[in-house]
Image: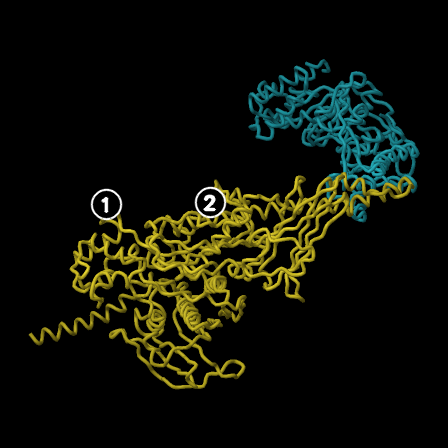
Amino acid sequence: MIRVAGIADKMAKNQKQIAISEFFEKNKHFLGFDSLQRSVITAVKEAVDNSLDACEEARILPEIKVKISKIDSNKDILELQTEDNGPGIPQKSIEKVFGQLLFGSRFHAIRQSRGQQGIGITGVVMYSQLTTGKPTHVISKIASDPTAVSVNIGLDTRKNKAVKSDQTRIIWENDDQTMKEHGLRVTTRMKAKYQRGRQSVFQYLRMTSIVNPHAEITFTDPDGETFHWPRVTERLPSKVDAIKPHPHGIELGQLQRMCRESSDSRMTVFLRQNFSGVSMRAAKELCEAAELEITTKPKSLKPDDVRALLEAFQGEREVNGKAIKLLSPPTNCLSPIEEMLIKKGLSKTIDSKFVATMTRAPTVSHGNPFQVEVGLIFGEGMVADKHVEVLRFANRVPLMYQQGGCLLTKAIESVDWRQYGLEQAGGKGVPKGPAAILVHLASTNVQFTSEAKEALSDNEFVFEETRRAMLEMGRGLRKHLEKKKKMAKTREKFELINDILPAIAEKSASILERPVPDLAGSITKIMSAVICNESTTWNKETKQVDVSITLFNYTSRSRSYSLLVNWPEKSGGEMVGNERGGRKEAMGIWGWKIETLEPGEKAVLEYSLSNLEKGDWTETEVFFRGSQDVIGATKLDEKMLVEIRKQEEILNQSDAPAEEGDANVTYEPGVVEGDSGQTTLFGGEN
Amino acid sequence: MARVNDPELTKARLHLVVEEMYDRIVKGEPPTMTLPVRTKNNIGFDKKLGVYKYGKKRSTRDATSLGSAKNLLRALHVVEFIEEMIEAGKSSTLREMYYISESWGLGKFGSQNESNNLAEDLEVVTTCLREDFKLRPEEDGARMIGNVTIEELNRRGQWMTINARDDVGDSGYGVPYNVEIEKIRLKEHDVNFLMAIETGGMFDRLVENGFDEEYNCGLIHLKGQPARSTRRIMKRMNEEWDLPVIVFLDGDPWSFRIFASIAYGAIKTAHISEYLATPSASYLGITADDILAYDLPSDELSKKDIEALNAELSDPRFADGWWQDQINMMLEIGKKAEQQSLAKYGLDFVTDTYLPEKLGEMGLA
């Protein structure tokens, strides 16, 4: 028997050894190491995601350097080096971080984080070792140590443990010979192929820089060419709070584990303290529905009890014929990039005239808070006859594969873009045109179609939110194109009266040998309109946005108008040097009265916007109140103004601290809250 | 209309165009240029002249859009340019004028089409001819073979006598761009009729087969849509020598248009139709009948062909019964055929069979 046991033990050990490398081999598709081209992207991804997450947690503005070099082209051996200025990893934790599968502090916490992909950096260490036999070299420095640790990490696949070697402490200097305060450098060699194009390290880093505008990223490719994506904001993403799971979003296994690990003395305490959205009343009702005593210890629940509890959670068990009402989970656990920063991120990588962005209000699907953000960039510089570039992100992580099967792509495809000025065969599919569309889903629980984690699975609520945001983008684009067309027409008219008409007058006078006639009358007849010219420009010297609006009266009667403009009041902009005064009409809307404008006269409104950065505000929309149409301005929709004012009120109210446990605020499972009241100046035609 | 041939009168008429613009500005109105509408909706049959002329519809080009304002400015530059040429005793081609416009700043032409159209506009408005404006076309005239003798004034100022059968090679006599009396005199001939031919291939076939001598006729190669000088010299021979003009073209909608421009006047040059058109010209073929009767190799009508045929149905120049029948028949059979498809029956078929039969029907053979 002992003999047998010994063999079994040995077999088990062997099995484990086989299991881990086999596990890797069998799952390399999910782990992102299924092809030589993809392996290097995955490796960069794991390292960079870790760096960004670590910097964010430590509240450090990230500086990330990535360098890929060819070591042996014949055998496709690449060296990848990534370096950050993050907090570093304490010496004793290095082997855990780099050498253990499923290590991570985020295993239980429910919050938005990047690191939901693959098995993390350990996978990279393992892949390197399996393909080159070489360990991964790590230098780590934490602020409190005077020196850095330098160590080689390999893997003992038999024991699923890291193997350290050549560990020393070194002095780590920056290029300029100053001491590196803190940071991490990982150098590893692997069998991999570097490629360019849509699925490349370059594209991954470019996309990463778009959604991480606070990061400074430098990339040196195998040809020695260096790319640099600068930091465009000093603002770190807001710190996200971990939230407790919501009963609507929990699965049986998780619930069983939570019960098993609970040390609570009674069910009501367990329910209220381990879940979000559960009030005292709801806790009691849940127990009642599941036919559990309030005083039962959660640890002692039998499998059937747990199942019953889950059914109560999901509304399948009722009390008095009603599902138990639960509060919405809090949404402050989400960290959207936010409109202005998406705009900056997009603008720095793509040169263009028009950028529209939108961050939808956070909402909930199946107990999971989520938030959709979209951006649309349009401009002459981009390729016009190809499909628009779709930039997909989940929790700030670029999604680069399986575009067609992704929910976010489907939401884009569901919009008839033709009405917004893009080409689209049959009004379906990804549109064509000189544009790029960005979609970002922030959620505590991102659902993918497969373990490869490259495409989001269908979810009608996320779909609907994304689609709505797309429609809004589309309306913005249409407005922009219409305005551009109008402006072009206006420019033509000005060319006509400023250049061509005087030339006609002079030439005809010279041929006939007569005096050059006065043009005023002809000009009024030709223009026969009131024309508004707007210019919004960044003033380098004053670091302000200068706005100038000129209203010309080229009609034969005197006119009177109110002119209104939009301005970035909500984003903290300040209006200065506005000598004509006027008044605030609503949040972000300023107005002036122009009493009389005689034929041939013009009125000029000038002001500057301070407290903004370059690129924050590039286009001012001008509205008018008055009977005669104004070319270059939009007739004010009074309903829109009322709507903005209403929004403002709601906003002010919701700024007040919400009372905890307000039993009146309930929510129905799986119902997206209304329009979330997001009306912009582009109006509410859905 | 006739030749003005008087520099002062030409200038005075051009000044009227300039004055219209100037006076409008003085009155506080946008400057304008008024001219007849130059589309098929504004051509009508002039009974006295027997050709189609522009009707009474006039359009006003006013400077309320950038495009037409630029057009007015260009017109002024052209007027000035013509005056300069008249005074300096020079002339230029339309193409040269297009290039000269490079220095006209805001008034420069965007394409040669624009400069050609503007020259025609000015002809129409002033009722002068472009020869009065000292503007020459780029287009080259026809080739002609047959026992016809003309006198042409050469560069050295000498009158040369040329017989278009005996004094020329196989390519025939080249018709110059100016065929007016000061340049070309029609001396004598011994032919019974003139035959205008669309394609070079067919012209060469008839020459090689000696058709001009056998049937005692003059052959003229039109080179597609005939140039003004080609139409003008046919008109002169028709009028001065009383020669019938027979037109032998491909059988498709575009050839019908060529015929219309020869016989009734082209829409673009309807202001000088009586000067270019030969109302008595007759269409020999290829007709829609021929395609069926001779079972000619044919092509399907394209979408554009069908559009063109339908447009011709409402074109006043094709309003008579014979043409309506031909056009409708072509639409019905949905086919078109080239002149050279007659080669189906051998190289001599056209001269031995087809033309004698057709001319016989017309009483010419």
Q: Nearer the viewer, mark 2 or mark 1?
A: 1
Around disc 1, counting alpha carbons within 10 Å, would you say few (fewer than 14), some (14 to 19), or many (20 or more)?
A: few
* x and y percentages locating residue B311 in the rendered image: 64, 25
Residue B36, relative to residue B81: is it above or below?
above
Where disc 1 sits, the SS reads loop
**Type of amino acid under label 1:** Gly
In the picture, which quadrant includes the N terminus of chain A?
bottom left
Kind of residue at disc 2: Val
Q: In the depicted view, which residue is nearer to us: A551 or A214?
A: A551
Whether residue B180 is situated above or below residue A284 in the rendered picture: above
Q: Residue at x 36, y 84 (%)?
A: A167
Q: State the residue position of label 2.
A: A415
Write down the quadrant of residue B29 in the picture.
top right
Q: Position of residue A8 (x, y in %)?
A: 13, 72
B242 or A57, nearer to the observer: A57
Q: Around disc 2, counting alpha carbons within 10 Å, would you say few (fewer than 14), some (14 to 19), or many (20 or more)?
A: many
The letter of the cyan chain is B
Q: Residue at x 9, y 73 (%)?
A: A4
Chain A's shade in the image? yellow
Q: Earlier in the sequence, mark 2 or mark 1?
A: 1
Of the pair A50 and B149, the residue shown nearer to us: A50
Q: Give the percent coordinates (x, y) of residue A671.
A: 36, 48
Chain for disc number 2: A
Left or right side of B89 for A83: left
User: Circle 1 sits on which residue?
Assistant: A321
- Left or right: B357 as drawn, with respect to A441: right
- Same subunit, labels 2 and 1: the answer reads yes
